[in-house]
């Protein structure tokens, strides 16, 4: 059975990468596949959405797929989670023992349990389920270096986006400046935390005087299926990288509105208004064999836009 949420300690590291595993909309076509993304932040490995064939894409692009301990599902349209039960059972066949937590809409827990029960599958590992909600901006996962938030989107069914946020790092000791003071080694930890200390000779030492500031915390916003929605701007403001669906060209805006999707132009407008540094667009309709028109449309509004091409690694 699925159990309550848990936290796991990790080791500091500086990598923050997004690998695109799937970039098409509902139908696999033109060599493109349904939505899935692999996220590495320090030594945490996340999977966001898990469309059909995701485990094959993870093997193809040589990501650390067996190290994934947390999976985030945005909503229950099949192109965003039909690969999940296959991945869970593959982990089981390969004798996985690491705990795994899935975050997603409440009904997903019943779907997974039904599939496991119907096949008589008993997992070798602990599977935890944490229900998401599409009514607010919520912290849903946290460890020593990372926070993950969910936020509401506007689609045909309850849908959430996800903000993956790096926590501020410790300040870095400046050896040349430290040498000017007689400081106990046990005080180094306090200085790295930005706390002023007193040296052996009684002098007050300000942390800012003997340490260097860490790099600014980085943020990645995953905006899954949604109509044009300025309500999410406060949640994704100043993101280093935004992924926003761009199912259609703007000439098909009426179709986008009808299906509760966005156009490339609208994705660019959101990135511009959010003051993002970079934008990647995906969830392409199968009507588009060539993607350059979508890219060009977005770049007219937000020049620092790229296509979410499968196998591409975006470094923050």
Image: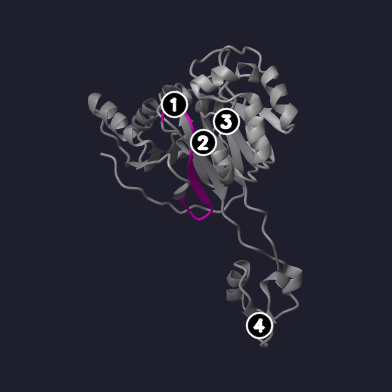
Find numbered disc 3 in the image and state the secondary structure of the residue it sits on.
loop
Q: Counting residues from the N terminus, which is met first, the one under dot 3 or under dot 1?
A: 1
> Label 2, label 4: how many angstroms apart (C-alpha)?
45 Å
> Label 1, label 2: how many angstroms apart (C-alpha)?
33 Å
Tell me where residue 142 appears, x and y as whole percent: 47, 51
Front of the two marks 1 and 2: 1
The reply to whether the C-beta atoms of the residues labelled 4 and 3 are less than 8 Å apart is no
> Label 4, label 1: how many angstroms apart (C-alpha)?
62 Å
Front of the two marks 2 and 3: 3
The reply to whether the C-beta atoms of the residues labelled 2 and 4 are less than 8 Å apart is no
- Give the colour scheme shown: one colour
Identify the residue position indicated by label 3 in the image.
228
63 in relation to 144, above or below? above
- The segment highlighted magenta reads 142-157
Residue at image point 51% right, 45% down: 44
Quarter holding residue 206: bottom right
| Closest to the observer, 244 or 6 | 244
Is residue 27 shown left or right of residue 205?
A: left
> Label 4, label 3: how many angstroms apart (C-alpha)?
56 Å
Identify the residue position indicated by label 1 in the image.
156
> Label 2, label 3: how many angstroms apart (C-alpha)?
34 Å
Front of the two marks 4 and 1: 1
Q: Dot 1: within a 10 Å radius of its alpha carbon, few (fewer than 14), some, or many (20 or more) residues?
A: some
Identify the residue position indicated by label 4 in the image.
199
Q: Counting residues from the N terminus, which is met first, the one under dot 2 or under dot 3?
A: 2
212 in relation to 86, above or below? below
Identify the residue position indicated by label 2 in the image.
64
Mark linked to residue 37: none
Instruction: Tell me the quarter of the image containing the N terminus.
Output: top left
């Amino acid at each position: 059975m699925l159990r309550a949420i848990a936290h796991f300690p990790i080791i500091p590291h500086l990598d923050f990468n997004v690998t695109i595993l799937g970039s098409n909309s509902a139908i696999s076509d033109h060599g493109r596949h349904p939505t899935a993304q692999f996220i590495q932040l320090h030594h945490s490995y996340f999977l966001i959405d898990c469309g059909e064939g995701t485990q094959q894409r993870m093997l193809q692009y040589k990501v650390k797929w067996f190290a994934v301990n947390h999976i985030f599902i945005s909503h229950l349209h099949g192109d965003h989670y039909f690969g999940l039960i296959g991945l869970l059972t593959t982990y089981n066949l390969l004798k996985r023992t690491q705990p795994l937590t899935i975050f997603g809409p409440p009904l997903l827990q019943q779907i997974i349990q039904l599939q496991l029960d119907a096949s008589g599958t008993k997992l070798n590992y602990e599977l935890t389920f944490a229900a998401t909600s599409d009514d607010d901006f919520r912290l849903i996962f946290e460890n020593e270096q990372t926070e993950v938030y969910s936020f509401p989107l506007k689609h045909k069914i309850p849908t959430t986006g996800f903000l993956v946020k790096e926590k501020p790092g410790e300040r870095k000791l400046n050896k040349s400046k430290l040498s000017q003071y007689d400081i106990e080694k046990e005080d180094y930890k306090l200085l790295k935390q930005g706390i002023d200390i007193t040296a052996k000779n009684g002098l007050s030492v300000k942390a800012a005087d003997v340490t260097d500031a860490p790099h600014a915390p980085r943020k990645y916003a995953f905006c899954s299926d949604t109509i044009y929605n300025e309500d999410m701007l406060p949640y994704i403001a100043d993101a280093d990288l935004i992924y926003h669906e761009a199912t259609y060209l703007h000439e098909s805006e009426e179709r986008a509105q009808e299906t509760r999707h966005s156009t490339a132009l609208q994705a660019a407008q959101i990135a511009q208004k959010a003051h993002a540094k970079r934008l990647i667009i995906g969830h392409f309709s199968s009507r588009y064999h060539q993607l350059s028109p979508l890219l060009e449309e977005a770049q007219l509004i937000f020049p620092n836009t790229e296509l979410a091409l499968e196998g591409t690694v975006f470094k923050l």
